[in-house]
Amino acid sequence: QSALTQPASVSGSPGQSITISCTGTSSDVGVYNYVSWYQKHPGRAPKLIIYEVSNRPSGASNRFSGSKSGNTASLTISGLQAEDEADYFCNSYTDTSTRWVFGGGTKVTVL
Amino acid sequence: QVQLQESGPGLVKPSETLSLTCTVSGGPTSRYYWTWIRQSPGKGLEWIGYIYNRVNTYYNPSLKSRLTISVDTSKNQFSLRLTSVTAADTAVYSCARGQVSGAYFDSWGQGILVTVSS
């Protein structure tokens, strides 16, 4: 069981936009703008695609965007492409003693 | 571009010590949170702990009594040592570089599966 709640799976057709939610609490997502998102393809290391809620690191596609409202952060992938098929997980700093919490991951399928 | 690679035994006996090393290439081992994270089968990701500035450590309270994270700057490596392991410690262990300023992990290793079994 993960501290942050994500849908297990999301799917979309090429060219569509999809949104993945990441719901936490007032101890993490709700109080800090330290939410990050990662893409993970099988057998490869996770790749940072969004940090501090909505910032994209260099090298991340501009089709990825992030936002936050209350205790829920969201990742939107626009113009869905076959290469976007992967697992995505969120992460937030927390004011509890565990410092960082993670989502359980969302499998994105491109139909 | 910094790269991280975990190494260590894939099988550890119950009650023994799990030791893993993360080798960092392409970047310094200072000024970051050098972090260990794990994912047990069927469970979510769990932050284990980090070392910062060579000597400052912060551990997940649930593991603190069994855990040591250290760094060897001469080898560009940092290590995890978890004592008295049980089957519950079976997991994929990953190392990651954490940014101090923004509390995110900008580089990760691929992860290594460690099974605790006799």
Image: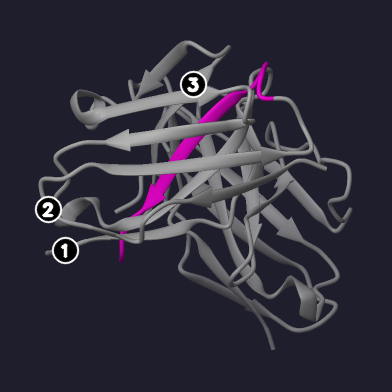
Residue at left offset 83%, top offset 43%: B1
Spatial CA span between label 3 and label 2: 26 Å
- The location of residue A44, given as percent across then percent down, is 63, 65
Few, some or many residues within 10 Å of mark 1 (<14, 14–19, 20+)? few
Q: Is residue A2 visible?
A: yes
Q: Chain of mark 1?
A: B
SS for tag 3?
Answer: strand
Residue at left offset 29%, top offset 54%: A1
The amino acid sitting under disc 1 is: Ser
Pointer 1 residue? B117
The amino acid sitting under disc 2 is: Pro
Q: Chain of mark 2?
A: B
Nearest-to-viewer mark from 1 and 3: 1
Residue nearest the observer in this picture, B102 or A45: A45
Spatial CA span between label 1 and label 3: 28 Å
Q: Are marks 1 and 3 on the same chain?
A: yes
Residue at left offset 49%, top offset 51%: B7
- Which stretch did the figure color magenta? B29-43
Q: Is residue A84 left or right of residue A106?
A: right
Spatial CA span between label 1 and label 2: 6 Å
> In the figure, B76 relative to B92: above or below?
above
Pointer 3 residue? B51
Residue nearest the observer in this picture, B108 or A47: B108
Q: Which mark is residue B14?
A: 2
The answer to whether the residue labelled 1 contacts the one labelled 2, judged by CB atoms less than 8 Å apart, is yes
- In the rendered image, which quarter contains the C terminus of chain A? bottom right
- The location of residue A64, given as percent across then percent down, is 79, 55
